[in-house]
Amino acid sequence: MKNKILNIYNRLYERFGPQGWWPADSAFEVAIGAILTQNTSWQNVEKAISNLKKKKALAFQKMYNMSRQELAGLIRPAGYYNIKAKRIKNLLEFLKRFYRGDIKKMLSRGLPVLRRELLSVNGIGPETADSILLYALKKPVFVVDAYTKRVLSRHKLAGHDADYDELQRLFMGHLPADTKLFNEYHALLVRLGKDFCKKAKAKCQECPVNDER
DNA sequence: CACCAGGCAAGTA
DNA sequence: TACTTGCATGGT
């Protein structure tokens, strides 16, 4: 097989179909969700998002005016709620300062600049930054996460010690810079991890990617 | 009961 | 630079 990376994508897509990420009503909601889901199950994040929606707090100004303590109370089900409240506040300050509180205003700027800016916010690391870039701003960046690392090392396409940038380059170097493709690919890897590599180890036998080897 | 989830930063050597 | 630890809820 000439392009294993693309081949894996095709298998995953055939097996699971389009995943329709990111489940959110706005770019702002994606950004908040990206922080909430740090090392946390999406199920718990949904509870936090639901609390925010009930309070109509999923809008920049409303959330900006809210105290850190009140925000922490609402996002409690997502875990790490104190530190995440701080991180969200940091992001809001950043948006206020450079984009007048409007995340959509980020669209006018270039990808490398945006990535550096997001990474400069305390609480936003590579995965969170790239999730915002890809899923909120629709920029062609590949998101790497724990599932991605596991799948690649399990199939011996990378060592278990490969770091974030290395894995990201591996994907982006073997794929066209296509937002839709990156969107589905990352979501499919997460889907694969949940369905096959987590619960029953036996199921890894029937893993759709685990064909030749 | 233990273990883990769509990470990140801060502290230590 | 390279480990280690804290952060925390809810599902299996």
Image: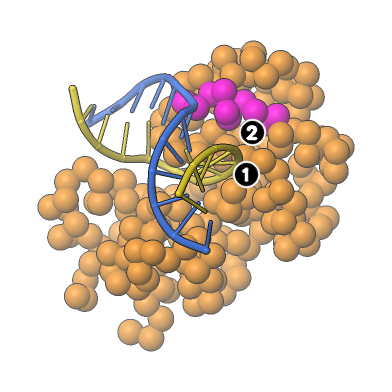
Chain colours: A orange, B yellow, C blue
Q: Quadrant of residue A160?
A: bottom left
Type of amino acid at the residue the image marks with label 1: Ile
Residue under numbered circle 2? A87
Please indicate whether residue A68 sits to the left or right of residue A127 in the image.
right
Of the image marks 1 and 2, the number of the one nearer the N terminus: 2
Q: CB of mark 1 within 8 Å of CB of mark 2? A: yes
Residue segment shown in magenta: A79-89
Q: How far is the residue under mark 1 from the one under mark 2?
A: 7 Å
**Mark 1, residues whose alpha carbon is within 10 Å: few (<14), some, or many (≥20)?**
many
Residue under numbered circle 1? A124
Q: Is residue C6 above or below residue A156?
A: above
Q: Quadrant of the N terminus of chain A?
A: bottom left
Q: Position of residue A130 (x, y in %)?
A: 60, 53
Please indicate whether residue A5 sits to the left or right of residue A104 in the image.
left
Q: Position of residue C1 (x, y in %)?
A: 52, 63
Question: Residue under mark 2: which chain is it in?
Answer: A
Q: Specify whether residue A11 is painted magenta.
A: no
Please indicate whether residue A179 sits to the left or right of residue A198 in the image.
right
Determine the secondary structure under disc 1. loop
Q: Position of residue A14 (x, y in %)?
A: 34, 63
Q: Does residue A182 appear in this view?
A: no
Determine the secondary structure under disc 2. helix
Q: Specify whether residue A80 is painted magenta.
A: yes
Q: Does residue A167 appear in this view?
A: yes
Give the residue displayed 35% in from the left and 73% down from the top.
A157
Q: Quadrant of residue A86?
A: top right
Q: Quadrant of residue A121?
A: top right
Secondary structure, magenta segment, majority class: helix
**Mark 2, residues whose alpha carbon is within 10 Å: few (<14), some, or many (≥20)?**
many
Give the residue displayed 54% in from the left and 65% down from the top.
A165
Type of amino acid at the residue the image marks with label 2: Arg
Give the residue displayed 30% in from the left and 72% down from the top.
A156
